[in-house]
Amino acid sequence: MNGKIKAPNPQDPKFEEWESNDNQVMSWLFNSMEPQVYEIFAYSETSKALWDSLRDMYGHAKNASCVFELQQEISKMERIAGQSFINHLRNLKRKWDELKQYCPIAATIEVYTEREEEDRIFQLLASLRPEYEDMRRQNLMQITLPSLASMCATVNREETR
């Protein structure tokens, strides 16, 4: 949904049509939900508010801890003895596809550059010894990852502590 679309004023002649369309979209969204999920969002005022709430709760964007875990799983995947190459490839492809849900193709060079830095941060965090687990977890749970330089400074401070 386009975040720039706003509900017309209730006195606007187009309001009834907008409200009807908005209710239809909300019905589609509600009908696609599990009952327990529906109960959480049943009182959303508009389809935009409903969509934004769903995105905030279930959206994959900026979920650094999931991306980190998937990258770790992929980097540690080995072909099991007796496993065919096709089955091994299928397992890898599943993980790649899941990772793609969190990191779709970069639309701009800025997004690409940001992802490249995130990958370096993930590689740095993965390379740290187990005693850094708390710091790793705290950084991965942040809505926005710190920069690589900031992360390096944090690790350095932690090491000298």
Image (cartoon, rainbow, N blue to C red):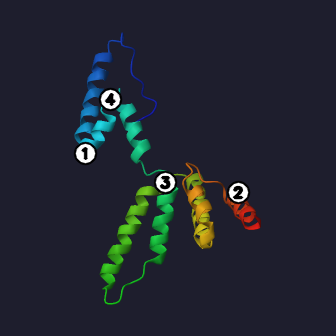
At 56% from the left edge and 53% from the top edge, which residue is drawn?
Answer: 111
142 vs 137: above or below: above
State how far apart marks 1 and 4 are (Cα): 15 Å
Query: Hey, what amino acid is under mark 1?
Result: Glu
- Kindly give the residue lying farthest to the right in the view shown: 160
Furthest toward the bottom, the residue is 82
Residues under numbered marks 4 and 2 in contact, where contact means CB atoms less than 8 Å apart: no
Q: Write down the residue under mark 4.
A: 43
Camera-side mark, 3 or 4: 4
Q: Considering only order in the chain, which callout, 2 or 1, is on the residue closer to the N terminus?
A: 1
* Element type where label 2 sits in the image: helix
The kind of residue on which mark 3 rests is Asn
- Front residue of this view, candidates 76 and 85: 76
Q: Name the residue under label 3.
A: 63
Please state the horizontal and vertical placement of residue 4, each as a whole percent of the image: 46, 30
Q: Categorize mark 2 by other alpha carbons within 10 Å: few (<14), some (14-19), many (20+).
A: few
Answer with mark 1 or mark 4, whichever residue precedes in sequence: 1
Q: Toward the viewer: 90 or 66?
A: 66
Q: Real-space Cα distance between discs 3 and 4?
A: 26 Å
Return the disc, 3 or 1, that comes first in the chain's sequence: 1
Mark 2 — residue? 150
| The label number, if any, that marks residue 24 in the structure image | none
- Callout 1 crowding tier (Cα within 10 Å): few <14, some 14–19, many ≥20: few
